[in-house]
Amino acid sequence: MALNPTLVRVPGTGELSLAPPGTPEPPDPTTPLPAAWSGLGLSTEDGVTIRRAVEKSGTTHWQQITPARYIYTSQEFGVSSVFQEIKGAVLSAYFGGMVFTETAAGSKKYRAEISSVPKGDERALCVDWVDQISATAIYHHRLYVPRAEVSETQDAQWTRTQEARWGLTFAALAPATGTTLAVWLTDDPAVLMAPSGGATPTASTQSR
């Protein structure tokens, strides 16, 4: 067995951010996102859920009951979270691109319209999370999805006993070019495959 408890990672904190479609991939996992990105802020303690579902069907045959091969029929990649802040970036995503504007210059009163006609609201998406194991072992992970759209919203219940919550699921869309659906950026050497006959980096080597 190849058990290595030093490779366990805990996403201790992080944030999901959105940007206009076509926003370039960040250069690395630690550089702050530029102004084009809007963080969605606080989310519930459940954090972020990543879902990948690939469906395939096996070929059927007269001579045998075991498939000779599988044919891929669909692939879904999604990111879900429940947000707790009421701000433009969150409400815009929840309501399909809704934008608040000031009712009159200097009035500090704002208005937005919820359309009766749903329409596409494509975004670029980033999920950042950090695991700080010690003062010297701090690992950053960044998931970048160049094309995503809200595929599902949870019911938002407003009560006096709980903050307003906005549950959103983002689904990755097919890439405009190439085959890259998403990109994972990190400075964590634990993700490296151990070479033949070698060993995966341990905590002592990672923190140097």
Image: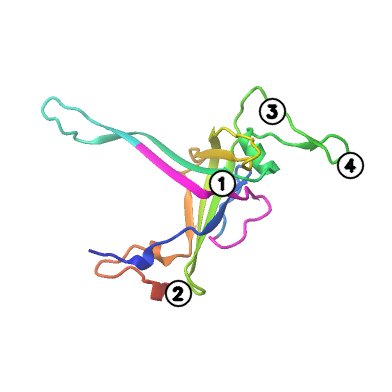
The residues bearing labels 1 and 3 have C-alpha atoms spaced at a distance of 23 Å
Q: Would you call the spot at circle 4 few (<14 residues within 10 Å), some (14-19), or many (20 or more)? A: few
What element does badge 1 sit on? Answer: strand
Looking at the rendered structure, the kind of residue marked 3 is Ile
> Considering the image in quadrants, where does the N terminus appear?
bottom left
> Do callouts 2 and 3 mark residues in contact (Cβ within 8 Å)?
no
Pointer 1 and pointer 3: residues touching (CB < 8 Å)?
A: no
| Tag 2 residue | 207
In this view of the protein, which residue sits in the foreground, 103 or 30? 103
User: In 3D space, how far apart are the residues under numbered discs 2 and 3 (Cα atoms)?
Assistant: 50 Å
Q: Residue 171 appears at what percent x and percent y?
A: 50, 38
Task: Compare marks 2 and 4 and give the one earlier in the sequence.
Answer: 4
Question: How dense is the environment of label 3, judged by Cα within 10 Å: few (below 14), some, or many (20 and up)?
Answer: few
Nearest to N terminus: mark 1 or mark 4: 4
**Which SS class for mark 4?**
loop
- Tell whether label 4 touches label 2 (CB within 8 Å): no
Q: Nearer the viewer, mark 2 or mark 1?
A: 2
Query: Considering depth in this image, is 91 or 24 the residue closer to the camera?
Result: 91
Query: Residue 5 in magenta?
Result: no
**Mark 1 lies on residue:** 125
Q: Locate residue 101 relative to residue 43 in the image: left or right.
A: right
> As displayed, is residue 114 above or below residue 207?
above
Q: Residue 76: give x, y in percent of width and height.
A: 43, 38
In the picture, measured across the screen, residue 71 lies left or right of residue 74, that is left
Q: Earlier in the sequence, mark 2 or mark 3?
A: 3
Q: As shown in the figure, which amino acid type bears the numbered disc 1?
A: Leu
In the picture of the structure, the residue carrying the numbered disc 3 is: 114
Task: Pinpoint residue 122: horizontal percent, then vertical percent.
Answer: 59, 37
Q: What residue sits 34% from the left and 35% below the top?
A: 55
- First in sequence: mark 2 vs mark 1: 1
In this picture, which residue range is highlighted in magenta?
28-54
Mark 4 = which residue? 106
